[in-house]
Amino acid sequence: MSEVRRWKCVLLLVASFGLNSCSKTVKPAVNAQQEIQNAFTSLQVGQRVDLASAANFGWDRVLVVGPYTPESTMKPFMNDVPSELDDIGISNRDDIHVLLFLESKVFVRAIVLPRHIAEFSKAILLQPISRGQANFERGAKDNEFVLAPSGQIEH
Amino acid sequence: MFNRNMGVKDKYNKLSPAERDFVWWNAIAAINFNENASTALAEAQKRFGASTLHNGSGDSFRHCFWSAMNARDQGIAVARKFGEAHEDWVGNPANEKTMDLHNNSVGFDIGGWSIGATDRHLAVLCVEAWVNKKLIQIDSAKGSDLVYSNSYEKKLYR
């Protein structure tokens, strides 16, 4: 193999490696925000949302964050409070809840749920809920969701 | 409503249609109200517990203080117009809307009669309103009942 051909091969390999690296950073086409919102929409009293199925990506804990929650109160649950929360502005808004997905105390994703889609019982706000226990049941009061009986808050 | 670190477009996209309409016609006032919102939230966080910032004492104080600053800076009519637009979003629970509009009204009165007053002065007047049961809030212990401010807190200290 001539020196020129060898260099061409090396450049080709580097280029293809670069392309593959880029493609790995592309997020799946699935719109998690929309899927999770859909899961909570139009449920009847007693019907449940299995969050492990609706949020089909890697996470092991979820925190339900209520309106006007200061970011400082989320710090105990994760290594770093991500800038995404700053962008959402939950500390300054009362029209949404945020589902904060974590894996080994590392932030994975924040999903915004408008309150006209789902309310959450105050008892479950800012309580780490494991993936296996994250089943929410629509209660009788307005559109409030509570943790389903199988659900359990970790202490 | 707003966050200081967000881009203008991000902030605009998060507004309700009624708020967007207000911002479109009252851009200067909206910028002023945005700053006042941050001041009111920071003051409420300093003076009240985190658990009271939604529907509790901190929330009632924040609405009063924010509205007082808005009325002082832009007049009661403009401040009230924005306050009503701010509460006009789909799914806003009736009791929360009633609470916020009432506390806004107290703030408009305070700010409207305090032209030139400092933020600190308005904050003190809103604390006085809270202490004297002029504000209302939701008593979460009793479901979603509206109660006068400084009603159930006293029980904690008796």
Image (tube, rainbow, N blue to C red):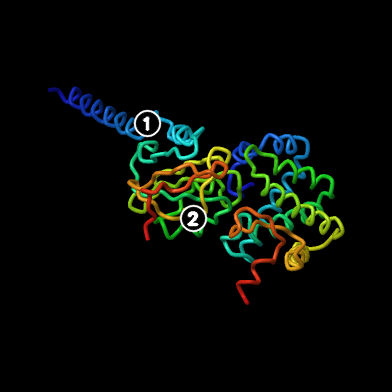
State the separation of the CA atoms marked 2 and 1: 33 Å
Please tell me in which quadrant of the rendered image residue B64 appears: bottom right
User: Disc 2 is attached to a residue of which chain?
Assistant: A
Q: How many marks?
A: 2
Residue for point 73% across, 55% down: B66
Q: Residue A64, how many percent across, how many down?
A: 47, 49
Residue for point 82% across, 57% down: B111
Q: Which mark is residue B140?
A: none
> From the image, which quarter does the C terminus of chain A lie in?
bottom left
Q: Which mark is residue A28?
A: 1
Q: Residue B54, how many percent across, how many down?
A: 61, 55
Q: Secondary structure at mark 2?
A: helix
Q: Residue B16, how many percent across, how many down?
A: 66, 37
Sequence order check, earlier mark of 2 and 1: 1
Residue for point 60% across, 60% down: B52
Q: Nearer the viewer, residue A40 or A149?
A: A149
Please tell me in which quadrant of the rendered image residue B15 appears: top right
Q: Residue A69, how many percent across, how many down?
A: 55, 54
The residue wearing badge 2 is A123
> What amino acid is at disc 2?
Ala
Q: Nearer the viewer, residue A125 or B26?
A: A125
Q: Secondary structure at mark 1?
A: loop
Q: From this view, report whether residue A9 is shown above or below residue A92.
A: above
Q: Nearer the viewer, residue A16 or B115?
A: B115
